[in-house]
């Protein structure tokens, strides 16, 4: 085990955390030098991770660096059932084959932060499939229906007369039994998993085990600054985004989220983040710090050199009005073509109606001049640079 100071432990338990249940007990365990079994359960319902998912992975890395045993528990049994969601319907279940495929990609992506060679990977079908009906009834006896209905998402659905399936009550019981099977000392998860994490404590007690401690991390808002980061909301920064796209998406986050992203998504010391917070409150331009944030995030998922390059290109394009290095070049097949057709045919807008809307909003420029006339045509006899929004460019050159 690595010799860890009390100050370091305090930082790990405070930075980017919401709740630490049995915090003082957990601190004693961490100070004792004992290697803890730290469980993180995932139903790999999706394969593409974003930096919101990585908030808890970064916290797992801190514990791994302290010498503790990280256990990735993939729900190849529970994932076929589906965890109750905060949405007004039950989550759709996946097949074992889908879950296995997603889990393998998941491991590839989290290996950016974690030393996977030291991570213990487990699958909960190994024990949940072996439970008899008697075992399931015994497990169900650990909770009452009233306790299950305390969960906010069930109350929301009940208030709207929306269905709650019986299998959804079983899900937290099975997640709790996972902690029994693994003899977990600590379990990590997002705040949306608090009910399930607490179920693990209850069930471990029922099975005469020392109940696990719990650490929850915040939910990271997406680039819109409002909703939870997610692919369905189109407000996410993907782990496998290329450096340019990753940096560009960071530039879109609201100013009020800059310091939260620094705390949850980077390794910048808290003392520096406090200085950034103070500087912004005193009127310093938030863009200065947002550019650093983008560079720090790109450096984590790509390289420091990539972070430097995309920041410089951003400066060139948006501050010094230069063209991006990778601007797309096209040759017109005819002498003349409508601007709207060029925009749509080359992916700068998804449809003619969107292209017209962008034109009407003044979001389209030709050679640096704002264009609102949708009847304009582009000629093949001269070089033309088309810009749509802040980040989409196209150069039309003669054939």
Image (tube, rainbow, N blue to C red):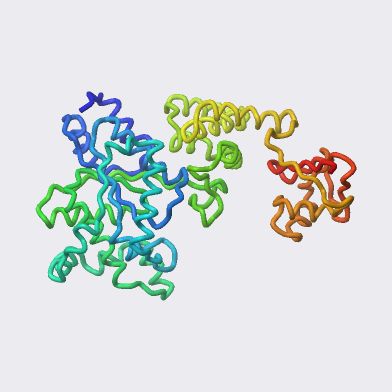
Q: Can residue 57 be spotted in the picture? A: yes
In this view, the residue in front, 7 or 187, is 187
Would residue 118 appear left or right of 137 to someone viewing this image? Answer: right
Would residue 128 appear left or right of 254 to someone viewing this image? Answer: left
Write the residue at 47% across / 25% down: 272
Residue 57 image offset from top left, x and y in percent: 37, 41
Residue 145 image offset from top left, x and y in percent: 25, 69
Tag count: 0
Relative to 155, does residue 258 appear above or below in the rendering?
above
Specify the quadrant that holds the N terminus. Answer: top left
Relative to 322, does residue 88 appear above or below in the rendering?
below
Determine which quarter of the picture holds residue 385.
Answer: top right
Would residue 281 appear left or right of 76 to someone viewing this image? Answer: right
Determine which quarter of the picture holds residue 315.
Answer: top right
Write the residue at 22% across / 34% down: 27
Write the residue at 31% across / 35% down: 13
Extreme residue in the left direction: 208
Specify the quadrant that holds the C terminus. Answer: top right
Residue 339 image offset from top left, x and y in percent: 83, 52
Q: Can residue 283 be spotted in the picture? A: no
In this view, the residue in front, 168 or 25, is 168
In this view, the residue in front, 257 or 94, is 94
Residue 230 image offset from top left, x and y in percent: 49, 52
């Amino acid at each position: 085990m690595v010799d860890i100071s009390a100050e370091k432990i305090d930082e790990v338990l405070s930075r980017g955390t919401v709740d630490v249940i049995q915090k003082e007990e957990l601190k004693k365990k961490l100070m004792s030098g004992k290697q803890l079994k730290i469980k993180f359960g995932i139903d790999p319902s999706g394969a593409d991770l974003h930096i919101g998912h990585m908030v808890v992975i970064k916290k797992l890395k801190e514990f791994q660096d302290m010498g503790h045993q990280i256990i990735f528990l993939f729900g190849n049994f529970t994932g076929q059932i589906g965890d109750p969601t905060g949405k007004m319907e039950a989550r759709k279940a996946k097949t074992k084959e889908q879950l296995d495929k997603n889990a393998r990609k998941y491991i590839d992506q989290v290996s950016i932060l974690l030393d996977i060679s030291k991570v213990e990977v487990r699958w909960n079908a190994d024990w949940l499939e072996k439970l008899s009906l008697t075992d399931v009834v015994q497990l169900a006896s650990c909770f009452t229906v009233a306790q299950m209905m305390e969960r906010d998402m069930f109350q929301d659905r009940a208030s709207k007369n929306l269905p709650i399936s019986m299998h959804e009550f079983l899900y937290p019981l099975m997640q709790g039994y996972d902690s029994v099977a693994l003899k977990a000392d600590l379990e990590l998860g997002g705040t949306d998993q608090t009910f399930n994490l607490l179920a693990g404590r209850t069930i471990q007690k029922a099975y005469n085990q020392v109940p696990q401690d719990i650490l929850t991390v915040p939910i990271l808002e997406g680039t819109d600054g409002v909703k939870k980061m997610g692919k369905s909301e189109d407000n996410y920064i993907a782990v496998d985004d290329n450096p340019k796209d990753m940096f560009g998406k960071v530039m879109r986050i609201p100013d009020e989220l800059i310091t939260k992203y620094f705390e949850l998504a980077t390794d910048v010391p808290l003392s520096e983040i406090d200085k950034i917070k103070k500087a912004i409150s005193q009127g310093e331009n938030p863009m200065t710090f947002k550019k650093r944030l983008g560079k720090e995030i790109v450096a984590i998922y790509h390289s420091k050199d990539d972070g430097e390059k995309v920041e410089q290109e951003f400066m060139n394009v948006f501050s010094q009005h230069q063209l991006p290095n990778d601007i797309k070049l096209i040759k017109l097949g005819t002498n003349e073509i409508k601007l709207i057709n060029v925009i749509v045919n080359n992916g700068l807008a998804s449809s003619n109606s969107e292209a017209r809307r962008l034109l009407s909003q003044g979001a389209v420029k030709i050679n640096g001049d704002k264009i609102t006339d949708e009847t304009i045509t582009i000629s093949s006899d001269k070089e033309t640079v088309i810009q749509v929004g802040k980040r989409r460019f196209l150069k039309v050159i003669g054939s």
